[in-house]
Amino acid sequence: MNKQRCHWPGADELMLKYHDEEWGVPVHNDDKLFEFIILDGFQAGLSWKTILHKRENFRAAFDNFDAKKIIHYSEEKIAELLQDAGIIRNKLKIRASISNARAFLETQKEFGSFDNYIWQFTDHKTINNKLKSLKNMPVTSAESDAMSKDLKKRGFKFAGSTICYAFMQAAGMVNDHTTDCFRYKEVSNQ
């Protein structure tokens, strides 16, 4: 039986799996939140499909997104990453990942967890947008604007409002499944 779902995953199996199992599910694990920050930064100017198909390569290349390891990346490690065809080889984004790891750890220390910090932008609950179609899906919001401004103030790079909004969707801070999608109610009840 075919399930009614959002149209954006298309027929790509990995995108469908991501849509059906991850996208919009509230994330409160700091390691997973950091992974999304890094991946969404690499997504800037690219499609999520491109990033998703390279996610396992990113995990291997970036020490499973261990911020405590990433902050110690040397110029040699950066050069190695720039040669890794399995990831996006963008020097600015690679360097941003290192500075974002530092900012992440500092923010985590200040708030007790990154989860405590990041979820304050949605008052610690998921915003259910009740979208009828994808054409109504926003790319930014007042919450992503505020998040972007604060992340940048803390030293995060590739943290514009559009990237923050994509992060919010991935981390379940907003539920942008269309109301006719089988995941809308499932995610709303989490």
Image: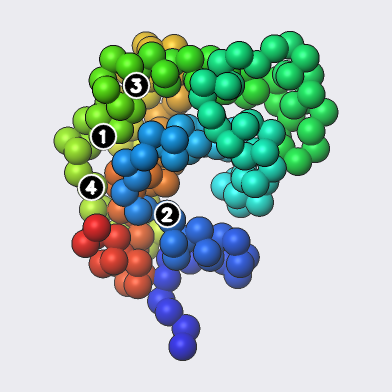
Whole-number angstrom distance, CA of label 1 to CA of label 2: 16 Å
Q: Count residues near mark 2 (Cα–Cα under 10 Å), then give few for <14, some for 14-19, many for 20+.
A: many
Gap between marks 1 and 3 measured at Cα: 12 Å
Residue beneath disc 1: 119
Task: Answer with the quarter of the image where residue 64 lies.
Answer: top right
In which quadrant is the C terminus drawn?
Answer: bottom left
Residues at discs 1 and 2 in contact (Cβ within 8 Å):
no
Instruction: For marks 4 and 1, give the one nearer the viewer.
Output: 1
Find disc 3 in the rendering and name its residue: 108
Label ID, residue 143: none
Callout 3: 10 Å neighbours few (<14), some, many (20+)?
Answer: some
- Which numbered disc, 2 or 4, marks the residue that appears first in the sequence? 2
In the image, farthest residue toward the left: 123
Residue at disc 3, secondary structure: helix
**Which residue position is annotated with label 4?**
127
Give the residue type that dot 4 points to.
Answer: Ile
Tag in front: 2 or 4: 2
Report x, y in % for residue 93: 62, 24
Disc 1 crowd, CA 10 A, few/some/many (<14, 14-19, 20+): many
